Image: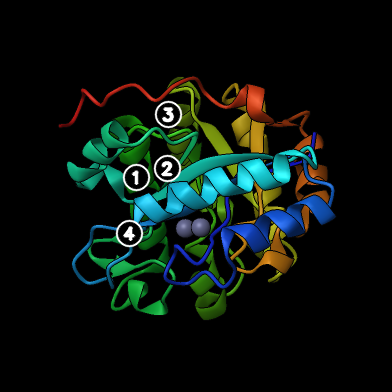
Amino acid sequence: MHTDFHMHSTHSIDGHHSIDEICRQAVNMGLDAIAVTDHVEWISVSPRQFPDYERYFADIEAARTRYGRDGLTVLSGAELGNPHQYPAAADLLNAYNFDVVIGSIHWLDGRNIHLSSVFEGRDPYGVYADYFAEMTRMVRLADFHILAHFDRIFMPGVDAFGPVAIARLEGPVRKMLDATVQHGKLLEVNTKLLDSRPGWNETMRTVLGWYREAGGTYVSINSDAHRAQHIGQRQAVGLELAREWGLEPAGIDQLPTAITPAVASF
Ligand SMILES: [Zn+2]
Ligand SMILES: [Zn+2]
């Protein structure tokens, strides 16, 4: 079963292709199932990032009709930025019935984790540790199926400070992984940055080994494509890293069951 459960359409501010174009590409690539997980952000410093859900679900329905004939399963979804910090996240999940919900840390103390300014005036390992602590809180407090791109802050980090000495982060990373397994969430192997920077795949390999030790069995191997041609990118690399530890790629059947209404934090 070939799946990709994390990608963006023009319903995201940074997506380049329509749901229809995405599905056509997925069929051409021989994928069995995809989820279109457009951005939802609540933080005030970000431009408004919230799909028009009437149009979004109409496009999903149309794609199901059109590409179902080709054997493609089209799942609805959403990528929530820091959902544990916004009560509106629970309202959104009560209002819409998403098939796949992704939880992401995009912000740390109001700073964008994709930018080097997240490290301004601080020791990078202190920032990394805070990032994984925030991720652990999100896993415990928010409802979602897949924990997205745990490696994302290493993008500005490696560019500014060189390869990550992941052993220095073992404590906070293992806490995050333990929480992920305990709360029945799937760890994502985000393929966007694999092979991209010195030491990147080694860092991923180490963390996946810790996830296995924490009791993890499945990973969700996803492209995070913002263009149709990036769907399924480097899936083979992600699969190889996962299988080194006996981790298997999650298909539809391994998605955690229905999102339960949030109780803990809201
Ligand atoms: Zn993201
Ligand atoms: Zn994304």
Tag 3 residue: 179
Q: Residue at x 34, y 45 (%)?
A: 133
Return the x and y of residue 19 as percentages of the image width and height.
58, 58
Q: CA distance from mark 3 to mark 1?
A: 11 Å
Q: CA distance from mark 3 to mark 2?
A: 11 Å
User: Which is more toward the observer, 5 or 182?
Assistant: 5
User: Taking the image as drawn, is residue 91 in sight?
Assistant: yes
Return the x and y of residue 244 as percentages of the image width and height.
81, 37
Q: Residue at x 62, y 41 (%)?
A: 64
Q: Is residue 64 left or right of residue 149?
A: right
Q: Amino acid at mark 1?
A: Ala
Q: Is residue 251 above or below residue 76?
A: above
Tag 4 residue: 50
Label 4, secondary structure: give it: loop
Q: CA distance from mark 4 to mark 3?
A: 28 Å
Return the x and y of residue 49 as percentages of the image width and height.
33, 64
The quadrant the C terminus occupies is top left
Instruction: Give the mark nearest the N terminus, 4 or 2.
Output: 4
Tag 2 residue: 172
**Mark in the foreground, 4 or 2:** 4
CB at mark 3 closer than 8 A to ligand 1?
no
**Mark in the foreground, 4 or 1:** 4
The numbered disc on residue 133 is 1
Local crowd size for mark 3, using a 10 Å CA cut-off: few (<14), some (14–19), many (≥20): some
